Image (tube, grey):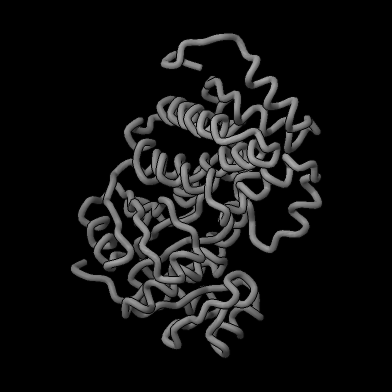
Amino acid sequence: MSSIHRIGVVGAGAWGTALAKHLAEKGLEIRLWAYEREVVAAINGQHENPVFLPGVSLPPSLVATGSLTDLTTESEGLLLVVPSHVARPVLRELVRSLSAPIPFISATKGVEEETLNLMTQVMTEILPPAMQRDLMVLSGPSFATEVSAGKPAVLCLAGSNEELTKTFQAALMTPVFRVYADSDVLGVQLGGALKNVMAIASGVVDGLDLGHNVRAALITRGLAEMVRLGVAMGADPRTFYGLSGVGDLVLTCTGGLSRNHTVGVRLGKGERLESILGTMQAVAEGVRTAKAAFGLARRHRVDMPIVQEINAVLFEGKSCRKAVTDLMERDAKPEKGQA
């Protein structure tokens, strides 16, 4: 495969729409699948996604569809950009429309709550064996609104097939959208998913107005937890110091555009989770990932105190201030120790 010209994007949320816009403006032939009929109609008629990316003008060449068969026909690659909790049913439906194996990239940053599977693990269970060898993951610090505005972004594309990864690396890159290649599919996914949990925790710190000192400490210790779990699961620890780890972690823990950070801020100010989520159009993946991350920590016997406390706040009614106090009053430990 020398070059890529036609890509199907599965999922027209903010990030899926931003990626589709980016690729269409590069000159690739892009079809964007949306579940919502009104989104399909708005993209094709008004060249805008008013539900998930309002106010952003989309190129007329970008075609939206509600049919997965239309999406897969003649596509040379697929980008999965749906929320993690609907990835399995969407993939099951998509498989029925495949006439031949197609390279697949996951740009979904989450963990399946029921099985604790990462997205490529879900894909491996559902996709034909011929497609399982060519799975890739796109992750890194990237707010959809900034990418859709043409602001520079730098991401990481990980895949086990080096030649194929380089081909799609070239297809994705532009002067304002830089992509680095990697082979640690597991680590890149974990970094992209776990940072959302830490972003909620960082938001709680900001909501409680505890200051920049403790937020910096939270980010640092959150990274330590991410590395511990990653190593226990077989990921390369160096991955977490790259774009899909530190890069995305810093962005979502400090950026005002982060949905997960916003959830944390509102929790810290005393709002209930149900009321917060009820006012959000888009998914805050960190809420579901928090429960899954805690499950992975127990499965692999890894101490993740920040993840544990966020779960207590989200699902057990623990107060944010009590959670912070309990973290601060843990037994003294060496910084480079296991916990």
Q: Position of residue 56 (x, y in %)?
A: 53, 77
Residue 28 showing in the rendered view: yes
Q: Position of residue 71 (x, y in %)?
A: 46, 75
The residue shown at (65%, 33%) is 210
Q: How many marks are shown on the rendered structure?
A: 0
The one nearer the camera, 53 or 295, is: 53
Q: Position of residue 39 (x, y in %)?
A: 62, 78
The residue shown at (36%, 80%) is 29
The residue shown at (48%, 81%) is 58
The one nearer the camera, 67 or 46, is: 46
Q: Quadrant of residue 240?
A: top left
Residue 114 showing in the rendered view: no
The residue shown at (71%, 26%) is 323
Q: Position of residue 312 (x, y in %)?
A: 72, 30
Tell whether 308 sits left or right of 80: right
The one nearer the camera, 155 or 90, is: 155
Note whether 148 is above or below 218 in the view shown.
below
Note whether 233 is above or below 49 in the view shown.
above
Q: Quadrant of residue 55?
A: bottom right
Tell whether 51 sits left or right of 24: right
Please state, as top left, top right, bottom left or bottom right, where the N terminus lies in the image: bottom left
Tell whether 277 sits left or right of 45: right
Residue farthest along the bottom direction in this orientation? 45
